[in-house]
């Protein structure tokens, strides 16, 4: 929600905290990557998408986001 509202600093802080608490969650890595895309941090976004895929190789959303980044 914070990302969609354009509050990118707050979104990053929230996602970083979520990753501290549950680094195994592929959905959090995916959302962190999307927030990085919005902030123009493409290299970090790609690393986040890679983490999401590593944690859940069956995540269509993570593979799609990674593919869009590499397009």
Image (cartoon, rainbow, N blue to C red):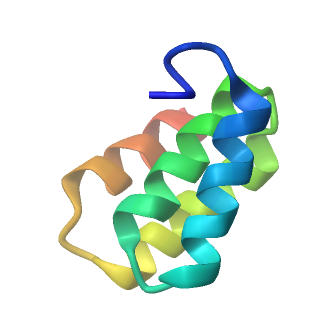
Q: Quadrant of residue 35?
A: top right
Q: Quadrant of residue 55?
A: bottom left
Residue pictured at 48% horizontal, 47% vertical = 31
Q: Is residue 6 left or right of residue 34?
A: right
Between 19 and 42, the one nearer to me in the picture? 19
Between 49 and 70, the one nearer to me in the picture? 49
What quarter of the picture does the N terminus occupy?
top left
- Asked if 22 appears above or below 42 in the picture, the reply is below
- Asked if 12 appears above or below 39 in the picture, the reply is below
Q: Position of residue 23 (x, y in %)?
A: 53, 83
Q: Position of residue 39 (x, y in %)?
A: 77, 27
Asked whether residue 14 is in view, the answer is yes
Asked whether residue 36 is in view, the answer is no
Q: Position of residue 43 (x, y in %)?
A: 79, 50
Q: Is residue 5 left or right of residue 55?
A: right
What quarter of the picture does the C terminus occupy?
top right
């Amino acid at each position: 929600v914070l990302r969609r509202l354009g509050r990118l600093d707050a979104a990053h802080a929230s996602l970083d905290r979520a990753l501290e608490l549950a680094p195994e969650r592929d959905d959090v890595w995916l959302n962190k990557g999307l927030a990085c895309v919005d902030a123009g941090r493409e290299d970090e976004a790609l690393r986040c998408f890679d983490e999401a895929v590593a944690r859940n190789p069956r995540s269509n959303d993570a593979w799609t986001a990674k593919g869009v980044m590499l397009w």
